[in-house]
């Protein structure tokens, strides 16, 4: 089975358990903490994915880092996943959990890349575009990409609207070559 399918199943189980225990928000914050820690500490994920490091050692690493900082439900999931030898996909499980949480809460994450910072008016326009397309509350992340030349690139999940001058110039270049 692919990693994303397994991670998705664990994440769905975790979200159901968290709802049942009335700790959904706490577990969500814990998954964000885990993702942030894993993103900032490459060594953590290397250790968790290493076949050389024993599972007991991996569990001790997770215990030292998270036991006192996360909800008992989150820590129990870390323990169960480690005992089932799935600790290498903990980062994917956290990502899938965040996606499932956002879906449950009606939140749509989107990213817009522009050449300059957005004004309030443009931010509202992008938020309205995403809301109209998805019908959900929007969390808009902004990135500044000096390589765009002009325009924007809007990314919603796996969809992308590329209205940048760079892409239009590339299209023209391809037309002239053919």
Image (cartoon, rainbow, N blue to C red):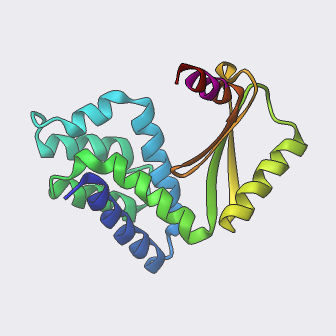
Instruction: Tell me the residue at 16%/40% (across/down).
Output: 57
Instruction: Note whether 158 is above or below 43 in the view shown.
Output: below
Q: Is residue 66 left or right of residue 101?
A: left
Residue 145's image quarter?
A: top right
Q: Work out which residue is located at the far right of the displayed protein and give it.
A: 121
Q: Is residue 58 left or right of residue 29?
A: left
The reply to whether residue 27 is in sight is no
Task: State whether the magenta stretch is mostly helix, strand or loop.
Answer: helix
The N terminus is located in which quarter? bottom left
Residue 106's image quarter?
A: bottom right
Residue 152 x, y percent position in the rendering = 72, 35
Instruction: Tell me the residue at 62%/59% (across/down).
Output: 108
Task: Looking at the picture, tell me which residue is in the foreground, 27 or 164.
Answer: 164
Q: Which residues are magenta?
A: 169-174
Q: Work out which residue is located at the far bottom of the displayed protein and give it.
A: 20
Residue 32 x, y percent position in the rendering = 50, 49
């Amino acid at each position: 089975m692919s990693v994303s399918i397994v991670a998705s199943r664990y994440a769905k189980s975790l979200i159901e358990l968290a709802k049942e225990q009335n700790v959904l928000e706490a577990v969500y914050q814990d998954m964000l903490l885990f993702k942030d820690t894993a993103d900032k500490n490459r060594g953590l994920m290397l250790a968790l994915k290493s076949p050389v490091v024993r599972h007991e050692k991996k569990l001790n690493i997770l215990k030292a880092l998270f036991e006192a900082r996360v909800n008992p439900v989150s820590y129990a999931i870390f323990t169960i996943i480690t005992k089932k030898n799935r600790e290498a996909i903990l980062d994917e499980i956290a990502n899938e959990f965040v996606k499932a949480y956002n879906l449950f809460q009606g939140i749509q994450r989107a990213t817009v890349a522009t050449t300059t910072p957005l004004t309030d008016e443009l931010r509202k326009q992008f938020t309205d575009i995403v809301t109209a397309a998805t019908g959900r509350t929007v969390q808009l992340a902004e990135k500044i990409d000096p390589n765009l030349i002009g325009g924007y690139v809007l990314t919603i999940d796996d969809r992308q609207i590329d209205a940048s001058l760079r892409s239009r110039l590339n299209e023209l270049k391809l037309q002239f070559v053919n």
